[in-house]
């Protein structure tokens, strides 16, 4: 299967060298072949490619989504998982500056990565851009699934109590 994927990648690199599909297949193939040092440069090259029809913020969003998938696939692999996770955090931070509405997505990723306090900070930030009930439900789910502390639970409950009358 890897040989077949390599053939497809070679074809894509000829036909669409700057396309997301090319970068994605290249990164996935590098992960499968354990060529870990190729993954992040491939994604960075895609980000830096000037694509007039795809704004940089859209490319960052695409890369973040791909990094989330790759990080999940590499979970438990000490050689690459921490690097993919760190890069995902970095790119999410960049993205949230330009598109605050993705703060809740970032929070979910942070929670899955075991950073519940950071996730709750992001949820609090998302209160400005997402429906409060959606943010609160996500935050409560994070606290429960991560077995959060009483302090973390009270923090989320405070948003619910303090903001119930502010629901849009």
Image (spheres, rainbow, N blue to C red):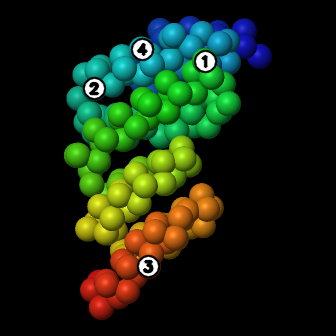
In this rendering, the answer to whether 6 lies above or below 161 is above
Q: Which residue is at a point 47% across and 40% down the rendered structure image?
A: 65
Q: Where is mark 4, residue-wise?
A: 41
Frontmost of labels 3 and 2 is: 3
Mark 1 secondary-structure assignment: loop
Q: Sequence-wise, which precedes: disc 4 or disc 3?
A: 4
Label 4 or label 2, whichever lies nearer to me, is: 4
Q: Which mark is residue 79?
A: 1
Residue most extreme to the bottom: 165
User: Which of the marked residues, 1 or 3, is nearer the chain's N terminus?
Assistant: 1
Seen at 38% across and 79% down, the residue is 158
Q: Residue 34 in the image: x percent, y percent? A: 65, 13
Q: Is residue 88 left or right of residue 165?
A: right
Whichever of labels 4 and 2 marks the residue nearer the N terminus, that label is 4
Q: Quadrant of residue 145?
A: bottom right
**Residue that mark 3 sits on:** 157
Q: Tell me which numbered mark, 2 or 1, is placed earlier along the sequence.
A: 2
Task: Tell me which corner region of the image, top left, top right, bottom left or bottom right, holds residue 41.
Answer: top left
Q: Nearer the viewer, mark 4 or mark 3?
A: 3
Q: Residues within 10 Å of mark 2 (few under 14, many from 20)?
A: few
The tag earlier along the polypeptide, 1 or 4, is: 4
Q: Which quadrant is the C terminus positioned in?
A: bottom left
Q: Position of residue 113 (x, y in %)?
A: 54, 44
């Amino acid at each position: 299967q890897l040989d077949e994927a390599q053939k497809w990648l070679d074809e894509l690199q000829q036909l669409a060298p700057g396309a997301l599909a090319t970068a994605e297949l290249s990164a996935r193939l590098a992960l499968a072949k354990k060529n870990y040092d190729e993954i992040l440069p491939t994604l960075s090259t895609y980000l830096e490619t000037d694509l007039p029809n795809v704004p940089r913020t859209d490319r960052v969003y695409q890369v973040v989504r791909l990094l989330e998938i790759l990080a999940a696939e590499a979970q438990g692999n000490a050689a690459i998982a921490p690097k993919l996770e760190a890069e995902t955090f970095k790119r999410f931070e960049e993205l949230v500056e330009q598109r605050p509405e993705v703060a809740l997505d970032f929070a979910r990723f942070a929670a899955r990565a075991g950073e519940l306090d950071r996730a709750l900070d992001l949820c609090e930030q998302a209160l400005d851009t997402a429906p409060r009930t959606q943010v609160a439900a996500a935050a409560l789910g994070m606290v429960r699934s991560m077995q959060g502390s009483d302090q973390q639970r009270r923090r989320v409950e405070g948003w619910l109590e303090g903001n119930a009358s502010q629901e849009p």
